[in-house]
C-alpha cells in the first residue's frame, strides 16, 4: 500500500502557489494565510508554509488584529517559526498599521470621532498595556502633532496636565483630542476616564483651548465622549 506523500508548495499547481498567485492575480485575491506563507517562505516537516500559516491564524480565531497583539515568543512556539520568520510577520503587521495611520494623517483634518479613532486605532489598538495620547489641532481641525502622555494605565499613572497644556501652547494648538486604549476591549468609560477628562478640560478652558473629544480605543472599535454626550 502506497503511503500518502505530502506535496510541498513547489509541487502544487502554479496557480495555487502563493507567490505565483500574487504575481498572476494580485495580492488582493490571496487569503491571509497565503500572504503570511509568502512572509515565512517555508513550513516544517509536517506542514507547508500555507498550512502552518493557517494554524497560526486559527490560534487567534483568524483575527489579524488579535495576531497583531502577539509577540515573537508566541510565534516561535509554532514548529517551523524561528526568530527571523516571527520578526518578518510582526514587521509586516506593523507596516499595515502605519499605512492606516498615514492615510488619516495625510488627510490631515479631523471631521469627527471616526477620523480620530482611525488615526489612533493602528497606533494603540493592539497594545497589551494602556497608553494615553493627545492630538493637537489648529483652528481648521487640521492635525498639528500627536504625542504620548503616559503608559501603564490611567489610574496608575500620573498624567501631567501642565505638560499637555505647555505642548499645546508651544504648537499654537486651538483644540485637542484625548485618546487612550482599553486592552481588555471593554467599551465603557470608567470613573477615572471621566475624572481625568474633566480635569484636562477645565484646565484647557483657562488657556482658551478646546477639548473636542476623548476617544477610547478597543479591539477594532471605539467610543467617543463627544458622541456619547459625556464630554464635560
Image (cartoon, rainbow, N blue to C red):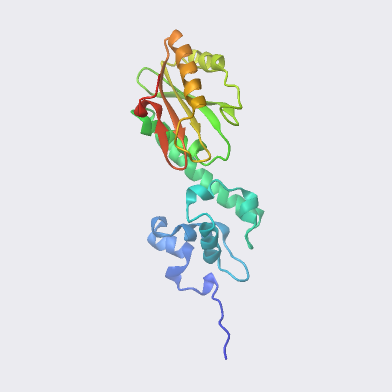
Question: In x, y percent, where is residue 10?
Answer: 53, 71
Quadrant containing the C terminus in the rendered view: top left
- In this rendering, position of residue 74 left or right of residue 34: right
Looking at this view, name the residue that lies furthest to the top.
206
Question: In x, y percent, where is residue 182?
Answer: 51, 36
Looking at this view, name the residue that lies furthest to the front.
191
In front of the other: 224 or 72: 224
Quadrant containing the N terminus in the rendered view: bottom right
Question: In x, y percent, where is residue 66?
Answer: 51, 48
User: Is the residue 70 above or below the residue 162 in the image?
Assistant: below
Residue 26 is drawn in which quadrant? bottom left
User: Is the residue 61 above or below the residue 49 in the image?
Assistant: above
How many numbered dots are placed on residues in this image? 0
Residue 173 is drawn in which quadrant? top left
Residue 227 is drawn in which quadrant? top left
Residue beneath the point at 53% across and 47% down: 68
Residue beneath the point at 44% across and 37% down: 187
In front of the other: 20 or 169: 169
Question: In x, y percent, where is residue 33?
Answer: 49, 60
Residue beneath the point at 37% across and 22% down: 141
User: Is the residue 222 above or below the residue 145 in the image?
Assistant: below
User: Is the residue 210 above or below the residue 229 in the image?
Assistant: above
Looking at this view, name the residue that lies furthest to the bottom.
1
Amino acid at each position: 500500500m502506497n503511503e500518502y506523500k505530502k506535496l510541498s508548495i513547489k509541487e502544487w499547481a502554479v496557480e495555487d502557489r502563493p507567490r505565483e498567485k500574487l504575481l498572476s492575480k494580485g495580492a488582493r485575491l490571496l487569503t491571509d494565510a497565503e500572504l503570511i506563507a509568502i512572509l515565512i517562505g517555508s513550513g516544517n516537516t509536517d506542514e507547508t508554509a500555507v498550512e502552518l500559516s493557517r494554524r497560526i491564524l486559527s490560534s487567534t480565531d483568524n483575527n489579524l488584529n488579535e495576531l497583531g497583539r502577539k509577540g515573537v515568543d508566541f510565534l516561535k512556539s509554532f514548529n517551523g517559526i524561528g526568530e527571523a520568520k516571527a520578526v518578518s510577520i510582526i514587521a509586516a503587521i506593523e507596516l499595515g498599521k502605519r499605512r492606516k495611520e498615514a492615510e488619516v494623517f495625510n488627510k490631515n483634518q479631523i471631521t469627527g470621532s471616526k477620523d480620530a479613532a482611525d488615526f489612533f486605532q493602528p497606533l494603540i489598538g493592539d497594545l497589551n498595556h494602556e497608553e494615553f495620547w493627545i492630538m493637537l489641532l489648529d483652528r481648521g481641525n487640521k492635525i498639528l502633532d500627536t504625542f504620548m502622555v503616559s503608559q501603564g494605565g490611567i489610574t496608575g499613572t500620573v498624567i501631567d496636565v501642565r505638560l499637555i497644556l505647555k505642548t499645546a501652547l508651544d504648537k499654537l494648538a486651538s483644540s485637542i483630542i484625548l485618546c487612550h486604549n482599553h486592552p481588555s476591549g471593554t467599551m465603557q468609560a470608567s470613573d477615572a476616564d471621566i475624572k481625568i477628562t474633566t480635569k484636562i478640560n477645565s484646565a484647557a478652558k483657562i488657556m482658551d483651548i478646546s477639548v473636542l473629544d476623548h476617544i477610547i480605543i478597543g479591539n477594532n472599535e471605539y467610543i467617543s465622549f463627544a458622541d456619547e454626550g459625556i464630554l464635560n
